[in-house]
Amino acid sequence: NVVLDRDELNILEYGLNYIPSKILSIEDQLKADLELTANRYPELQMNVGLVRDSIVYNSDPFSPNLHRSQYKSLNNLKRRNDIVIKQADKGQGTVVISREVYEAKTYALLEDKKSYEELSENPMWTTYETVRDEIKDLIKTGNIPKEYVSRIRLRGRPKLPRFYILPKVHKKLCPGRPVVSGIGHSTEKPSKFLDLLLKPHI
């Protein structure tokens, strides 16, 4: 059982798409950056303070969209390692579930050998190289229009897909719907490109 106080429940009612304003102070970082620049250019040292004060004065003031007690509750929820907060399957609200129960439901899905296979090694880089070479060949042979090349070409270090579940609160025993998030994986850009091509025909 997960126990939450009234303030924590209140902040969760905003939903997981709500973005709280962040309290940002640029003054300290700005001071350090300006001093670093002034050390390189001594003629600027006399005006460092004026420049800093001018930037800070003209910056947009912080406008909180939560009460102080709500920020406190939000931080309390973030620090709790015994719970998992997820959106319910089909967008039916926000679910707070104990980490122990969440992990048990997740591992139960992964143990289904008909759906999942345990690998002896990480295929991330092999997949990356295969996808990269295929994209290069498609570009070289003109099968990918020039205007799409920058959108499909792989850049940066690939990431492993992330497996998680969305609780099906509308079903008995609240099973989890498995989701594999491929954001940052080497197949992400080609998948978006194919989706763009196929969407008009579906």
Image: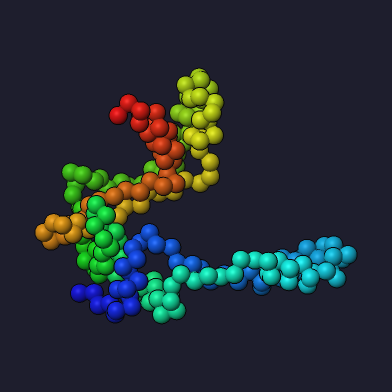
Residue at horizontal 19 percent and vertical 56 percent from the top = 168
Q: Tell me: residue 198, above or below residue 121.
A: above
Q: Residue furthest left?
A: 172
* Left or right: 55 in relation to 202: right
Percent position (x, y) of residue 164?
30, 55
Percent position (x, y) of residue 121?
36, 46
Of residues 190 and 67, the one nearer the viewer is 67
Residue at horizontal 39 percent and vertical 73 percent from the top = 74
Of residues 17 and 79, the one nearer the viewer is 17
Q: Residue furthest top?
A: 141
* Left or right: 106 in relation to 39: left
Q: Is residue 162 visible?
A: yes
Q: In which quadrant of the rendered image does the C terminus lie?
A: top left
Q: Tell me: residue 102, above or below residue 137.
A: below
The image's colour scheme reads rainbow
Residue at horizontal 54 percent and vertical 28 percent from the top = 147
Percent position (x, y) of residue 201?
32, 26
Q: In which quadrant of the rendered image does the N terminus lie?
A: bottom left
Q: Is residue 76 visible?
A: no
